[in-house]
Image (cartoon, helix red, strand yellow):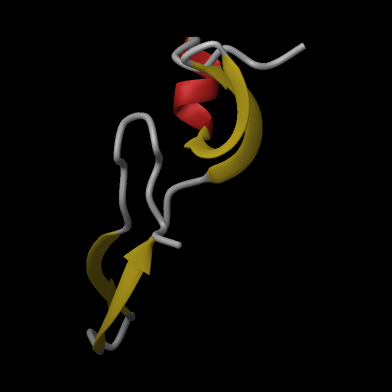
Amino acid sequence: MALACEICNKKPQYGNTISHAHNVTRRRWNPNLRRVRAVVKGTNVHIRVCTSCIRSGRVTKAA
C-alpha cells in the first residue's frame, strides 16, 4: 500500500537533515494520513486520506 493520499495524491517529500556540525543525512517527511470511512460514488469505503483533505472538506465522511 503506497504512502499517498487517495484524494490529492500527496506523497512523502525528501530532503536533508543538517546538524550543527553541518553533517548532512537524507530524511523524508511523510504526509499525515488517516484511514477514513468515506462516501465514494454512493458507497461507503475505507480510504487513506491526508488530514488537510479532511479539514478542507474534500472528503465526505460516512454517517
Residue under the image location 22 percent in, 67 percent down: 15
Q: Position of residue 36 (x, y in %)?
A: 64, 33
> In the image, is residue 5 above or below residue 53?
below
63 with respect to 8 (left or right):
right
Please provide percent x and percent y for residue 62: 70, 16
Q: How many marks?
A: 0
Is 13 positioned to the left or the right of 31 in the image? left
Relative to 3, is 8 above or below? above
Q: Is residue 61 above or below residue 8?
A: above
Left or right, 14 with respect to 60, comes to: left
- At 39% from the left and 38% from the top, the residue drawn is 6
**Outermost residue toward the right in this view:** 63
Picture residue at 60% right of the left edge, 41% below the top = 34
Residue 55 in the image: state x and y as whole percent: 54, 17
Which quarter of the rendered picture does the C terminus lie within? top right
| Residue 16 found in image quarter | bottom left
Q: Nearer the viewer, residue 61 or 32?
A: 61
Q: Residue at x 34, y 67 (%)?
A: 28
Q: Nearer the viewer, residue 23 or 20?
A: 23
In the picture, measured across the screen, residue 5 lies left or right of residue 21, that is right
Task: Pick the quarter of the image with the N terminus.
Answer: bottom left
Taking depth in this image into account, of 61 and 57 the one nearest to the observer is 61
Q: Is residue 14 above or below residue 57?
A: below
Image position, residue 59 (x, y; %): 51, 17
